[in-house]
C-alpha cells in the first residue's frame, strides 16, 4: 500500500476554542484525527508517543483561524509562500496551537513532514518553559557550540564552547524565562565572554556590539531593516551558526530570535538525527 505523504484539511464542522493572542481559533474531532494521521506518517512520528493523549488534554490543539470555506481558500491563495505563523506555544495558556490553515497549500493540503517537524519544534518550546533546568542541562553542549560559533564569527574571537554555554544560559534565564534582559546586559555579557579573545580593537568591538543591538531592536519591532545592510551581517552570523555547528542550512528562517531565546536553537534542529535521542527523552517528560 502506498504511503500517504500529506493530508487534506478544510474548515468544515468546526467549533470555537476561544481567542488566543487576538486570533479566534476553531477545531473539530475530524481535524484532530487528520492531524494525528499526518504526524504518524512523518519521519519524526516516534518522537511523541502519546500525541493523542496530549491532544485530548488540549496540551496541543490543531486548529483553524477561520470557519469560512470561501475565506479559507481565498487566504490560502493570497498568503501561502509568505511569512505566516505555522504554530505557536502560548506561555499564557501553557498550550500549543497548530494552525492547519497556515500550513496548508492553496489546495488545502498539509504535508505530513511539515506537521511532524513543526509539532516537535513547538513541543521543544513547551519543554523549555515547563522543564527549564532539564532543558538547559540536556542541551548545554549544543547551545555552547552555537553561541560560541556565532560570536566568534561576529566579533572575530575564539570563544570556547564552555563560555558559549554560559552566554546561552544567561540569555535563557534572563531573556527567555524572565524577560528582564536589557541591551546593556547583553553588551556586558559579550564583553565578559567574547572580548578577551577578540582581535577587534576597542572601537571596532564597541561599534559591532552597537550594530548588533540595533539589529535586535529592529527585529523585535518588526522593522524589515534588520534584514538589510548594514544589519544583515548579524543575521548572517546567526544563520552561519546553524550551518557550521550543525550542518543545517536554515534557508527561509529569520535568525534573530536566537539572540534572546536559546530554545529556538534547539527547536530549529529538533528534527535532526544528532539530537534525536535527547529530543525523544525530553518529549517523554510531557504528559
Image (cartoon, rainbow, N blue to C red):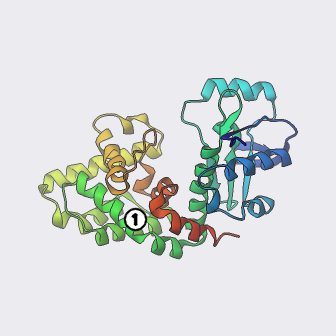
As drawn, 91 above or below 211? below
- Left or right of 266 on screen, residue 149: left
- Left or right of 266 on screen, residue 21: right
Is residue 180 visible in the rendered structure shown here? Answer: no
Q: Position of residue 278 (x, y in %)?
A: 51, 69
Give residue 206's quadrant in the image.
bottom left
Name the element at disc 1.
helix
Is residue 199 visible in the rendered structure shown here? Answer: yes
* Closer to the camera in the image, 197 or 37: 37
Give residue 132's quadrant in the image.
bottom right
Mark 1, other Cα within 10 Å: few <14 / some 14–19 / many ≥20? many
Position of the N terminus, as image quadrant, is top right
As drawn, 252 above or below 42? above
Q: Which residue is mark 1?
A: 142
Q: Residue at x 29, y 62 (%)?
A: 148
- Left or right of 56 on screen, residue 49: left
* Closer to the camera in the image, 163 or 219: 163
Q: Position of residue 192 (x, y in %)?
A: 25, 69
* Closer to the camera in the image, 196 or 59: 59
Position of the C terminus, as image quadrant, is bottom right
- Left or right of 127 on screen, residue 168: left
Q: Residue at x 69, y 34 (%)?
A: 109
Extreme-front residue of the structure: 1
Q: Position of residue 243 (x, y in %)?
A: 35, 50
Q: Position of residue 8 (x, y in %)?
A: 74, 36
Amino acid at each position: 500500500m502506498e504511503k500517504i505523504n500529506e493530508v487534506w484539511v478544510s474548515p468544515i464542522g468546526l467549533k470555537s476554542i476561544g481567542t488566543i493572542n487576538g486570533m479566534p481559533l476553531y477545531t473539530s474531532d475530524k481535524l484532530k484525527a487528520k492531524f494525528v494521521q499526518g504526524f504518524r506518517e512523518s519521519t519524526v512520528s516516534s518522537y511523541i508517543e502519546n500525541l493523542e493523549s496530549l491532544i485530548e488534554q488540549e496540551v496541543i490543539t490543531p486548529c483553524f483561524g477561520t470557519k469560512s470555506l470561501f475565506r479559507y481558500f481565498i487566504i490560502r491563495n493570497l498568503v501561502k509562500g509568505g511569512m505566516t505563523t505555522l504554530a505557536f506555544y502560548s506561555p499564557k495558556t501553557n498550550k500549543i496551537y497548530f494552525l492547519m490553515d497556515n500550513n496548508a497549500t492553496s489546495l488545502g493540503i498539509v504535508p505530513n513532514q511539515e506537521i511532524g517537524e513543526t509539532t516537535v519544534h513547538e513541543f521543544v518550546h513547551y519543554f523549555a518553559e515547563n522543564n527549564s533546568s532539564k532543558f538547559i542541562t540536556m542541551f548545554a553542549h549544543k547551545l555552547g557550540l552555537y553561541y560560541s560559533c556565532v560570536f566568534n564569527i561576529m566579533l572575530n574571537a575564539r570563544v570556547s564552547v564552555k563560555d558559549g554555554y554560559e552566554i546561552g544560559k544567561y540569555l535563557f534565564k534572563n531573556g527567555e524565562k524572565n524577560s528582564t534582559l536589557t541591551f546593556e546586559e547583553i553588551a556586558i555579557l559579550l564583553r565578559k565572554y567574547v572580548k578577551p579573545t577578540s582581535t577587534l580593537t576597542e572601537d571596532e568591538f564597541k561599534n559591532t556590539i552597537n550594530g548588533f543591538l540595533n539589529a535586535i531592536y529592529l527585529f523585535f519591532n518588526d522593522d524589515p531593516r534588520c534584514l538589510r545592510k548594514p544589519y544583515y551581517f548579524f543575521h548572517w552570523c546567526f544563520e552561519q551558526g546553524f550551518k557550521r555547528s550543525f550542518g543545517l542550512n536554515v534557508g527561509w528562517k529569520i535568525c534573530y530570535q536566537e539572540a534572546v531565546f536559546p530554545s529556538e536553537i534547539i527547536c530549529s534542529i529538533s528534527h535532526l538525527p544528532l539530537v534525536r535521542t535527547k529530543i525523544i527523552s525530553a518529549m517523554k517528560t510531557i504528559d
